[in-house]
Image (cartoon, helix red, strand yellow):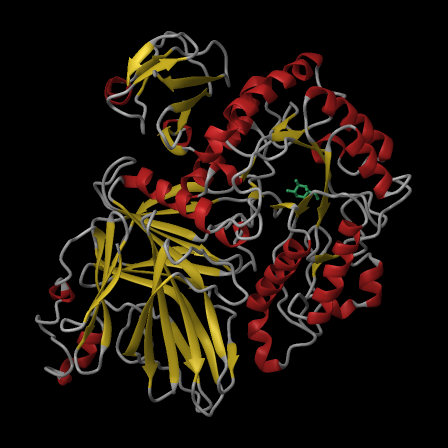
Amino acid sequence: MGIEFFEKERIFKLDTPKSSYIIGVVDEENFVGHVYYGKKCRDYKLGYLMRTDEAPFVPSKNERDRLSFLDAFPFEYSTHGLGDFRESCIQVKTSKGQSAVSLSYVEHKIYAGKPALSGLPATFGTEQECSTLELVCRDNVLDLKVILYYSVFEDTDVVTRSVKVVNEGKETIYLTKVLSACLDMDNQDFELLTMHGSWARERKVQYRKIGYGQQGVTSLRGESSHQDHPFMALKAGDATQEMGDVYGMHFVYSGNFLAQAELNQFDSVRAVMGINPKDFCWKLEPQDEFQAPEVVLVYSAQGLDGMTTSLHTLYRKHLIRSEYKDKKRPILINNWEATYFDFNTEKLLQIAKQASELGIEMLVMDDGWFGKRNDDNTSLGDWDVNEEKINGGLKYLVDEVNKLGMKFGIWFEPEMISPDSELYKAHPDWAIAVPDRTPGRARNQFVLDLSRKDVREHTYESIAKILRSANIEYVKWDMNRPLSDIGSAELPADRQGELFHRYVLGVYELQERMMTEFPHLLLENCSGGGARFDPGMLYYSPQIWCSDDTDAIERLSIQEGTAMIYPLSTMGAHVSDCPNHTVGRITPFETRGYVALAGTFGYELDVTKIPEEDRNSIPEQIQMYHKYNDLVREGNYYRIASYAQNHEYDCYMVVSQEQTEALVTFVQVLNRPNCKSRKIKLKGLKSEANYVLEETGALYAGDTLMNAGILIENPWGDFKGKLLHLTMQK
Ligand code: DGJ
């Protein structure tokens, strides 16, 4: 495992436990080519795969067909304007108005460990856990240095990539495009897997066969978005959930992105990922550098399941930093769906008192506690406690909640400013806006210009002063509108194209600062539900609110997409009241509990008002959480059946790392008459071990459970669920 350089052949070989990634340097001009990515190979002499011995050969042997070479060669990092007509990764604008870039290998470094990316979230590991290759390339005409970073980990099958650009010349250069990763491969009848959605419908999985030309997903909303997700996978035509080649690319970033696959004339595919070049232009003065965010590449020979396992391992061990990452999270009750804006100290304490008696461990006060905010039209930016509602003050409320033996959490939307706020009256120029245009409102609010230091300073202090004022142990950091009307009152004209990225850096800086001052805080990111559920945010918060749709049935497919690429420990999931506030559906309280169990688990209801029968079942539900959460948080997750695909039932399971315990969740959606029981084949168990099914006491062989399966009787009624708990016989 690790990274090696074979000098004679000019080959770099990067090995993970089960995959190899091979790079070659070719010809006199030192082009950096992609040789191979896939199942582990012992040999490194695979340079022939770059096909430089076939026509059109390399420029030193055939300069007359240089363009044909450039347009067919598998580049590690594609360049612009000189004959490679596929998607480029980098493009510039010089003082002479030129845009072309050409890159050649210059030198490299291989070392143990992995450098942090300045100002950006990134995966990390110790010198024992990972190693890094820095490939230094240069454009000698532009005097531009481009460093390609690759890291591999000892315990998971991923290769991470990022790019740093340094202006070594004497003239200012504008970077108009700088993607983070490129992967050129022969087509394997690939299907493109992406995730799409909308508010309350996030991360629904979509498959499409790739065709000639370009296809992919993007965001230009300033956040990763409800609509598209900064992830894509290329799944070989014969790959399945359990078997076959799958290549995933996931962007560790929370702003505009481009994820694109391009099938070309030679049936090779170029997959690229990075900051969306639209509305991006970064000024690089002499000696300035630009650090592009990280992309996680994952290869699996075990279909989608293998990809999921690798990403879960990476994020759990090498991305999430919170002190809560390996801990059970306090079971919270959030007052949003319980009261919306209509609450005061008494109401919150009534909820808390009842909740604490039932075993709930934390009260979260959501939107509406500050300024004069009694609806969503006002006061964002005025982070002063509204003592008419929070009578007695915030500290009194928190102390009273603490006296009940509960923790206290609070909601903020730090990035926003209401036109109707004291802050806006004082600083109208702090909102992002195009000069001479009235900025568009969304939820009646504007976005703060976090590219400005004074705005960040003020924003941080307004939140921190609240956090310092009482024993607040959890923050829900919300963000309820995308960015539009891109313009900053402070940035000079030739830096306006930096605003989108500077905004994201501003968000990261604020969250980093908050977690540094309040290291014990449990932070949950949120964006009108799950519009900013991305690996970038996981670097700051161990959990993210998955969706505003808390309906147990809608959540099946939302959580299916989310869990395919994120650990269950990161998925904010709550039990809410019925009829569900988003879709009006009535589902059994029990099923709502089973579905929320797959995430962080909590409640989003007025516990003093729900039906008595539901309330009475909360202690049992909480026992269930305590019994299974270690397994859910730490175990390996497997998808068994998808309601989104079969339209009848959903089934997934988690297996402990030692394979001694497993929990299967089965949810039937609509019942049908006169049906046979369903056969479910389990996964991830030890073939040679025997397992006891707790519900019946029956003993099954591991290989029987996985190869032959078990039968699950259709539950009576709609929207019913079942848990099956298996423990290894000692
Ligand atoms: C959107 C969030 O997703 C909700 O949970 C809630 O916090 C509201 N915002 C409050 O405005």
At horizontal 39% and vertical 34% (from top left) the residue drawn is: 636
Position of residue 683 relative to residue 84, above or below, is above
Q: Quadrant of residue 267?
A: bottom left
> Is residue 108 placed above or below 721 in the rendered structure?
below
Q: In front: 485, or 630? A: 630
Asked whether residue 645 is in view, the answer is no
Q: Is residue 48 left or right of residue 317?
A: left
Q: Quadrant of residue 241?
A: top left
Marker count (numbered) = 0
Q: Nearer the viewer, residue 534 or 277?
A: 534
Any part of residue 21 in sight: yes
Q: Is residue 449 above or below residue 129?
A: below
Determine the residue positioned at 23% across, 64% down.
Answer: 4
**Which residue corresponds to the image point at 69% horizontal and 76% vertical from the top-left?**
490
Quadrant (top left/top right/bottom left/bottom right) for the N terminus: bottom left
> Is residue 657 found left or right of 183 in the rendered image?
right
Is 581 rendered above or below residue 122? above
Q: Residue 150 lies in what quarter of the image?
A: bottom left
Q: Quick one: 194 or 599, which is closer to the camera?
A: 599
Q: Tell me residue 268's x, y (percent).
A: 21, 60
Residue 550 pos. (x, y %): 59, 32
Residue 370: x %, y % from top left = 82, 48
Q: Is residue 592 left or right of residue 204?
A: right
> Who's the residue at 27% across and 74% down the image?
84
Position in image of residue 579 (x %, y %)? 64, 23
Q: Quadrant of ligand 1?
A: top right
Quadrant of image for the C terminus: top left
